[in-house]
Amino acid sequence: MLSRRKLIKRLSSLPLVGGFVSGGFLATGSARAAETAVRDYFGELGVRPVINAAGAYTTLTASIMPDEVLDAYRQTAGEYVSYNELHDAVGEKIAELVGCEAAMVTAGAASAMTLATAGVLTGLDEGKAKRIPIDLSGMKQEVIVQKAHIVGYTHAIINCGVKLIVVESEQALRDAISDRTAMLYFTDEHSLDGPVGHEAFVALGKEHGIPTFIDAAASIPPKENISKFTNMGFDLVAISGGKAIRGPQSAGLLMGRKDLVAAARFNGPPTSDRIGRGMKVNKEELVAMWIAVERFMKSDYDKEYETWKTQVDWLKDQLSPIEGLAAESIIPQSPNTVPTLQLTLQSGRFSTTGYEIQKALLEGSPSVAVARPREDGFNLTTWMMKPQYLATVAIRVKEELLKARIS
Ligand SMILES: *Cc1c(COP(=O)(O)O)cnc(C)c1O
């Protein structure tokens, strides 16, 4: 940690805009503990808090739950309820809020992928549910995917023992469809990379009576994407609960057709001998996820977006005077489709790479995480950052850039 005095001194050298730096930038970890006499859990563990100028990344614990969500978490922890009754009731509330046929809370979008696949295979057949992933006899066993749509998370689908049929053209997709086809699987963030787009994909599923599934885990914002894919006709949609929606990081949503969501639920907890038994979502997370969705649906996302844009522009003003640096305000394609400052190190002007600066910022004091490091730069976002850290980010990034600049 920088000493408070030192950081204040550095801050006072920055031209500041009102509101962004209203105290609290040091109120992290042990500094906060000393000020408010609360227990410093991270400090006791020797784990340093990170200022998140990167975005909704799982490795950074993705998002921070708003107070309303934390209240729901805390308040529901002290009573027993029927797990199944609560699970179903929360699912109904979320479906109403989003405006889809059915919904369930899962242990993250990855769990939604596994449970969705399992449900498609088994329906409500207990014998089948007990057998996956070992013995898929009597079940359709193939899932078709476009090559460009295969990502690390695809593992969550093949967990069920299915065989992936990988295609590279619309004709190949049509040819691959048979009576062995259980599901057609699509990844939203690669929607432009494969030959078959959303609508044509959904249409193929409908034409052949095969369920279509979309991994849209990190496809919010924009806000309307929470209901876009069910409205479009995808039978099953997976979204992370702990990224832009800011529910518990371990929660996710599976939304879509009522019979298929029910079949997915059938393969999850609390029943012991099911593939999803290890994907338990506790009562606090169930309720917190409902409240996170409720809050998200009510939120004025346009206004939040404007705030992020103003913050990014402010960072740009702070950093663009650095010679040899190109600072551009952009909005990238999915994921993390939010106002972003793209910093590019012009060739020959810096003694180091974007990767090394990212590492120095992360290992520095305070620790600052930035996004998409590359040879010639990295990105900054503010949407997952506490606003009081904005000036600190400007200071630290500026310091590292100036250190590396060849004058
Ligand atoms: C984050 C992510 C997942 C996994 O989501 P969790 O909620 O962390 O399980 C799956 N697919 C994509 C594309 C993601 O970005």
Image (cartoon, rainbow, N blue to C red):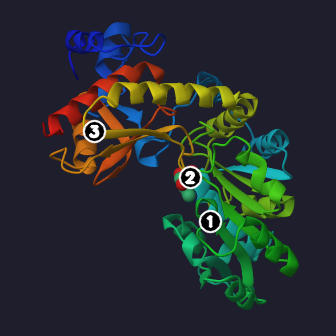
Query: Decide: marks 1, 2 in contact (CB < 8 A)?
Result: yes
Who comes first in sequence, dot 3 or dot 2? 2
| Quarter of the rendering occupied by the N terminus | top left
Residue 48 at x, y = what percent?
29, 32
Q: Name the residue under label 2.
A: 333
Q: Which mark is residue 362?
A: 3
Say above or below: 164 vs 78.
below
Ligand 1 resides in the quarter of the picture at bottom right
Please name the residue shown 40% across and 23% down the image: 390
Q: What element carries label 1?
A: loop
Residue 7 at x, y = what percent?
25, 15
Q: How far apart are marks 1 and 2 (CA)?
A: 10 Å
Who comes first in sequence, dot 3 or dot 1? 1
Q: Which residue lies furthest to the left in this view?
A: 407
Who comes first in sequence, dot 1 or dot 2? 1
Please name the residue shown 19% across and 44% down the image: 349
The answer to whether residue 139 is seen in the rendering is: no
Relative to 290, 361 lies left or right: left
Mark 3 surroundings within 10 Å by alpha-carbon count, few (fewer than 14), some (14 through 19), many (20 or more): some
Mark 2 surroundings within 10 Å by alpha-carbon count, few (fewer than 14), some (14 through 19), many (20 or more): few
Q: Name the residue under label 1.
A: 192
Quarter of the image where one finds residue 178: bottom right
Q: Nearer the viewer, residue 252 or 372?
A: 372
Q: Which of 26 and 46 is in front in this view?
A: 26
Say above or below: 310 vs 149.
above
Task: Establish whether ligand 1 lies closer than 8 Å to the Cβ of label 1.
Answer: no
* Residue type pointed to by label 1: Leu
Quarter of the image where one finds residue 80: top right
Q: Is mark 3 on a helix, strand or loop?
A: helix
